[in-house]
Image: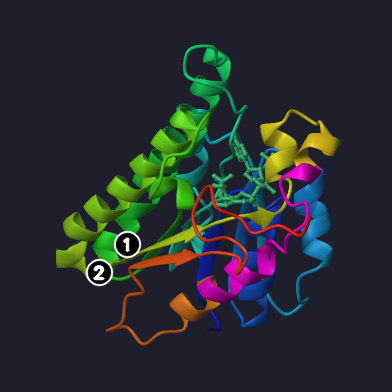
């Protein structure tokens, strides 16, 4: 995978960070994005010195900034082979009648519109070159709806639909479009969802063995190393203890 470029959004922690390290280890040059620039500098220390690294600090909600940065990449970084739309989070977990409008805005603006802004900037290069791969990180919440998760699930259902639409529209250009839909993965996800309440975040994974970010990065690696006639279109990956969005076997 030498001289290939992967752009990973949300590479400051969790799944995005694991994907960046994994792709770097198989030779990809890495563009890593997120809002926490210090985390991107730390990530650099974990990457092999043999690859090139470009950290980009921006909020995916900032439509102008996303376009300004991604449409004006330095010449050597313009030809992106793999885009991983990973940046996203849940914000809150509340019934629709009492949930916070700011949480709803955050989820729709980041998980859906942010993914679109980034894709809009990167897709023209892929269609012009008639090659490339887009990997969208969905969720089990893209396939099922659970109590108090209406808008997070809605945002991920949108990611699922947009992924299918991308696959259809980009079909004439040979651009491969992949969706990976994880169940419970222990990252900073629950800490963000519960606004820094680490005790509540811990209960999400209590008494069960969740996936780890590397489990998802392994699937990313599998998808990007398939020959060009193969698209891993849609993967749902769950911890063994999880049978559905709401059914989790826990040790008591
Ligand atoms: P983390 O909270 O560990 O990582 C989220 C990443 O998204 C961070 O790098 C964060 O970077 C970035 N991000 C969040 N908001 C923004 C923003 N406004 N602008 C730019 N970057 C942003 O969680 P995960 O690694 O678990 O989540 C990654 C993806 O996986 C998400 O799309 C999530 O919905 C999905 N997912 C997670 C599951 C889980 O159980 N953990 C299961 C299924 C799907 P920064 O804060 O530095 O900006
Ligand atoms: C993250 C997994 O079950 O919290 O998308 O929605 S879940």
Where residue 181 appears, x then y in whole percent?
46, 58
Which quadrant of the structure image shows residue 30?
A: bottom right
Foreground of the two, 24 or 180: 180
Would residue 138 be seen by someone viewing this image from the given angle? no
Q: Which mark is residue 225?
A: none
Q: Is residue 25 above or below residue 52?
A: below
Magenta span: 202-219
Q: Give SS at disc 2.
A: loop
Q: Is mark 2 within 8 Å of ligand 1?
A: no
Residue receiving disc 1: 126
Q: Residue furthest bottom?
A: 227
65 sits left or right of 38 in the view: left
Q: Is residue 42 above or below residue 27?
A: above
Residue occupying image coordinates x 76% and y 60%: 251
Where residue 48 appears, x then y in whole percent?
76, 77
Q: How many marks?
A: 2
20 sits left or right of 116 in the view: right
Residue receiving disc 2: 130
Marks 2 and 1, Cα distance to the nearest angstrom?
A: 6 Å
Where residue 18 appears, x then y in whole percent?
68, 65
231 sits left or right of 34 in the view: left
Judged from the image, the quadrant occupied by ligand 1 is top right
């Amino acid at each position: 995978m030498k001289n290939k470029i992967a752009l990973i959004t949300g590479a400051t922690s969790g799944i995005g960070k694991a994907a960046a390290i994994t792709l770097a280890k198989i030779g990809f040059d890495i563009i890593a994005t997120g809002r926490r620039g210090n985390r991107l500098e730390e990530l650099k220390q974990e990457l092999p010195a043999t690859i090139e690294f470009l950290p980009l600090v921006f909020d995916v909600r900032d439509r102008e900034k996303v376009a300004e940065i991604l449409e004006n990449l330095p010449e050597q970084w313009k030809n992106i082979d793999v885009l991983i739309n990973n940046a996203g989070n849940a914000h809150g977990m509340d019934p629709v009648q009492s949930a916070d409008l700011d949480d709803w805005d955050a989820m729709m603006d980041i998980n859906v519109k942010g993914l679109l802004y980034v894709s809009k900037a990167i897709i023209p290069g892929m269609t012009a070159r008639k090659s490339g791969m887009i990997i969208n990180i969905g969720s089990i919440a893209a396939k099922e709806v659970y109590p108090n998760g209406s808008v997070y699930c809605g945002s991920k259902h949108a990611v699922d639909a947009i992924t299918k639409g991308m696959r259809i529209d980009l079909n004439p250009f040979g651009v491969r479009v992949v969706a990976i839909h994880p169940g419970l993965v222990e990252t900073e996800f629950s800490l963000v969802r519960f606004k820094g309440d680490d005790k509540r975040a811990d209960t999400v994974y209590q008494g069960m063995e969740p996936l780890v970010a590397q489990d998802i990065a392994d699937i990313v690696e599998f998808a990007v190393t398939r020959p060009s006639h193969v698209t891993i279109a849609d993967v749902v990956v769950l911890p063994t203890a999880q049978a559905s969005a709401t059914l989790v076997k826990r040790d008591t």
